[in-house]
Image: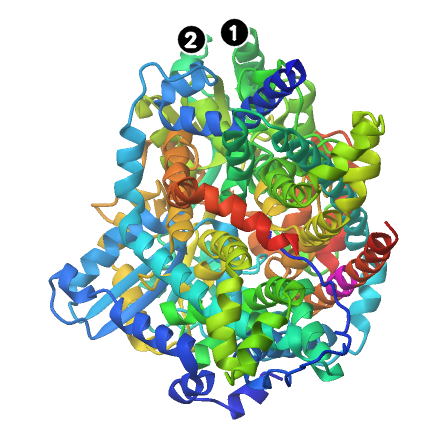
Amino acid sequence: MTDLLHHARVSRGQFLRMMGGLAAATLATTACSTRPDTTATTGGGEAATELKFIGVADQKTPMDELAAAYRKAVPAVRVTASYAPTDQVQTSLRTQLGAGNAPDLHVVYPGNGSAMSMSQIAGAGLLADLSQQAWTGTIPAGFKPAFQLDGKTYLYSAGSSVIGAVYNKKVFEQAGIDAPPATWTEFLGVCEKLKKAGVTPIALGAQTPWVTQLITYALVPSTVYAKDPSFDDKQLAGQAGFAGSGWQQAMEMYLELQKRGYFNDKPNGTTFEQQTSMVATGKAAMAIQVSAVLPDFRKAASSPDDLSMFPVPGADDPAQVWIPAGVVVGLGASAKGRNVEQAKAFIDFLGRQENVNAWAKAIAAIPLTQDANSAIDPAVESFLPFTKDRAVPFMDQRWPNAEVQPVHFAVVQELLAGDSTIGEALKKMDEAYRK
Amino acid sequence: MRRTFLLEIVMIVAAVAFLFPVYTLVVLSLKDPAQISQTPLAPPAPPTLDNFTAAWSAAALGPSLVNSTVITAVSLAALIALGSFAAYFLARVQTRLGYGLYVLFLLGIVLPFQLGMIPLYELVSDLGLIGTHAGMVLFYTGVQLPFTVFLYTGFIRALPREYASAAQIDGASHLVAFTRVVFPLLRPITGTVLILNAVFIWNDFFTPLVYLGGSGYETVPVSVFAYVGQYVSQHGLVFAGLVLGALPIVLVFLALQRYVIKGFASGLKG
Amino acid sequence: MTPVTAGRARPARVRRRRFTPASPSWLFAAPALAVYALIVLYPALAGVVYAFTDWSGIGREMSFVGLANFRTLLGDEQAMGSIGNTLLLTVAIVLVQNGVGLLLALGVHARLKSRALLRVIFFAPVVVSPVMVAFLWKYIYNPDPSSGLNGLLGLRVDWLGDPSVALWSIAGMVVWQYAGYSMVIFLAGLEGVPRELHEAAMIDGAGTWQRFRYVTWPLLAPAVTINLMLSTIGGLKLFDQVFAATGGGPGYATETLSTVLYKQAFVFGKFGYSTAVALVLALFVAAVSFVQVYYLRSREVSA
C-alpha cells in the first residue's frame, strides 16, 4: 500500500517548489546554512562515508571508544552514533525499519523474543548476513541460537553477561557473612543474617519493568534447565509449558523472598535507579541483576571496589545450581542500507579479538572469545566455573514471540502486589507463548 | 481588606506547595550522592555545582540548543504565516465547501500521531529530509497546523468585518487588507499560537529522536535523554541534566511572562 | 500532551450588509492545506489501511485480514480493560485540573499584591516537557518514607507501585503540570466579566457565592467549554506521562488505550492490530469531543 508513494515519488526540489512561498524558502535556507562542518572537528580530512548507528544508552561507552579507533584505522569512514533509553530506541528503530529506511548499523537483541531481536528483524529480511566474517567462526556452539537464524549470522555481540547477585562486600562482612552462599538454604540464611543486621537483604526495583524478570531468570536455570536441558525445545514443540514446570517452583521461591521480608518495602514503587543506589550506598546488601549493569552500580558507589557478584543458588544440591548467561545486546548491519559493505567492514573490525576485549571490558561482560589479553571482570569470576556446561541463555532469547516477556513483567508486578496467584500468572504466560 | 489578606496567605501557601517538585529538582541537582541519600529533603549543605559542570560537558548541549532554536523558530514562522492566511479564508468564506475544509482541519486535532507515523516517515525519507532541520520544520508545521488554524479562525470570526471591508472599499485587495489591516489585529491570538506551539515543538522528544537521531542535529530533549539514560542511577547528575534541558524555555518564559500570560489569555477570549 | 481542542464549528451565516466583499480567494488556504494534506492527512489515510492487515511493522510481508483486528479487539481483555483506565484517568484529570484551575483563577483574579508572581508560578510547569515532568515526579513518588512526597507529608504511600493508587498518582502529576493552563483560560474568562455586573449584584444584596453562581459562572461558559475540551482530548490521548511514569504497570493497572496501541506496535510487533486500536481511539476522541461541544455550546446559548 505504501507503493502508492513509491510510484509517485516526488523529488525534493519539485516538492519544495510545490509548497511555495515563505515557508519553503525559509526551510531551504536554514537547512543549508546551519549544517555544521563535521569534517573540521575531527581533523581527519574528508570522510567519504558516514555510517549511522543507533543504539541503547548501555552501548555508548564501548561504541564511542571503538568508533574512534575505527576512525583512526579507516579515515575514510566515520561512524556517527546516537543513543537513547531502550524503549525510545525501540520505537524509533521500528519506525525507521517499518518505513524501509534503517540506519546503517543499529542495536539488535540476541536470539528471539523481543521486537528488536535478531530473529524477528533478520526474519523480515532486514539484517545483512555476516556469516563470511572470520570472527563468526569462533562463536561457541551454545550461543549460536543468539547469533544465528537458519545457520546464518546476523548479530555482532562482544560476549555474554550473567545474572546473579550484585552485592556489597562491606555490608556482608559487617553482618558477619564471610562467604557467598552456595545453596538455596544458605542463601536464605544469608538474607536472614542481613535482615537481623538491620539492612535490606535484597533491593528490588520492580517499578522498572525489565527488573521484575531477573529473579525468575536467576532461579529458572536451576529449577527448570538443570533438570531438563531440552526444556526450550519441548516448550517450542508444545510438549511443555510454564505451568506445571520448574517455573512454578521459581515463582514460589521469588515470593518466598518477599514473604520473609527480604526485599525492600514496596518493590513495585521502587525503580531500577533506586535499587542501584540502595546497593551502592549500602542501604541494601545486594540486588539480583545482570552483570551488564555493574558499571551503573559502580558509578553510583563511593567505593566501587566494594561491589562484587555471586551466582544465585537456585537449588540445595550445588551440582544442580545452574546460572543464566546470555549474549549481551549487540548490533547488526542493515541489509537495505546505502553502505552495507562499509557497515559490514566495521562489524568485521569489531569482531577482532582486541576489540571484542575492549567492548566486553567496558560493560563487564565475559568476552565472546578469549586470548591472553582478555580481561575478565573480577566481579564475575565466580561465574566462570558454570559457563561451560551449567549455563543457559536468558529465557526470552528462545521465546517465539515478543509478547511473553512483557506478560512476565506484568504478572510479577501483580504477584508482588498480591493481586494474582502463581497459577494465574503462569497461565497468562502460557497463553502469550502460544500466540 | 482582611479577606483579601487571608486570600493572599492562602494563595501563597498554595504556590509554595505547588513549588515542591521544583524545589526537589533544584535541591537534588545541587547535592552530591551522599547528601542525596542521607538528607534528601533538606537544602544542600554545601551546594555543589559539580553535577552541572559534568552534565553540561557530557550532554553536549551547546549544539543542541542551536538546533532546537532554529527548528522552533522557523516552524513558528511557518505556522503563523500559513495558519493565519488559511484562517482568514476559513473565517470569511461562506460556502459549505469552506466549512467542510475547516472541519477537515479540525480532524487533525483528534487523530492519534501513531496512525500516520510510518507512512509519514517514509514520506520525509523519500523527500531526503531525514536528519535535517527542514524535515523537522515541515513536520511541525503540518502537525501543529490544525490547532493553529483553529485558534486563528475562532479569533478572526469574532473580529468585526468592517476593518477589512473599509480597506477594500478603498480598492485594496484581500491580500493587502489582510497583511496591512487584519494581521496586526491578530496580535493577541498570535501570542497564544506562538506560546503553545513553541512549548510543544521545543519539548517534543519522540519525533526528533526518530528523525534526527544519529544525524548530529539532535535537539535539546534528545541530548538530555541520551545523557539521562547514561546516568540513570545518579539522581544528582540526572536532575542537573533535566534542569539544563528545561532552563532555556523556562528562562524565555520568565523573561516574557507578562506577554505570555496576557497574550495567551487575550487570544482565547473571543 | 498536544494541546488540543475542538471547534466552535458552525457554518458562517450569510449576513446582509451594505457592503459585502467577495470571500477571500481559496489561495489563502492553499499553502496550509498542501502542508496539512501532505504531513497529516495523507499519512493518516495511508496508515489506516494497515488496520485491515496483519503487518508486523517491519518487512514487506503482509496480507489483508478484513475486520479481524477489530474482532480481536473486542475479545482482548487487556485492551478492553485499558478503556476503563483511560476513561477514569480522563474524568479525574478533567474534574481536578479544571476545579483547581478555576480556584486558582478566582484566587489570582482578586486584587492580591503577589498576583503577578502567583500567575507565573502556577503557569510555569506548562512550559516544561511532559517527559521531564514525569521523570521528576517518578522520584517525587518514590516509596521511601524519608524523601519525596512521602517525606514531605510524612506518609508511606506506594504512589506508583500500588495498583489501586498508581492511576490517581499519574492524574496528580498531570494536574500539577496543567492546572495553570486551565487557570489562564479561566482568567481570560473572568477578565471578560464586566465589573458593573458585580457592583449591581452587590447593590441587590447578593453574597459572594450568589455573585459567583449567577453573575460569574454563566459568563465563564465559553472558558469552561474550551477547558473541558482541551483536558478531555488531552486525557484521552495521554501517552507520554503514563509511559514514562509506569509504562502501564504495575501489572496492567495504568494501561490506557494509548499505551496498549504503543505496545502492540513497537513491543509486540503487531502493527496492523495497533493501527486498529489507534483508529478506535481516534473515533472515540472525535465522538466524545463532538458530543461535548454540542452540549456545552447549547448551554452557552441558554446561559
Query: Magenta stretch?
Result: C280-286
Between the residue at mark 1 and the residue at mark 2, the CA separation in whole angstroms equals 8 Å
**Quadrant housing the N terminus of chain B:** top right
Residue that numbered label 1 is attached to: A197
Say the numbered circle drawn on residue A174: 2
> Residue A305, position in %: x, y?
31, 24
Residue placed farthest to the bottom in the image? A7
Asked if residue A121 lies in the magenta stretch, the reply is no
Q: Residue at x 54, y 15 (%)?
A: C146
Query: Type of residue at label 2?
Result: Gln
What colour scheme has been applied to the protein in the rendered image?
rainbow
Query: Which picture quadrant has residue A11?
Result: bottom left
Q: Chain of mark 1?
A: A
In the image, residue C211 sits, relative to residue B39, either above or below, namely below
In this view, the residue in front, B53 or A89, is B53
Q: Is residue C103 visible?
A: yes
Q: Classify mark 2: helix, strand or loop.
A: helix
Classify 10 Å Cα crowding around label 1: few (below 14), some (14-19), many (20 and above): some
Earlier in the chain: of badge 1 and badge 2, it is 2
> Residue B172, position in %: x, y?
50, 83
In this view, the residue in front, A59 or C198, is C198
Q: Is residue A140 visible?
A: no
Mark 2 and mark 1 in contact (Cβ < 8 Å)?
yes
> Residue B226, position in %: x, y?
39, 48
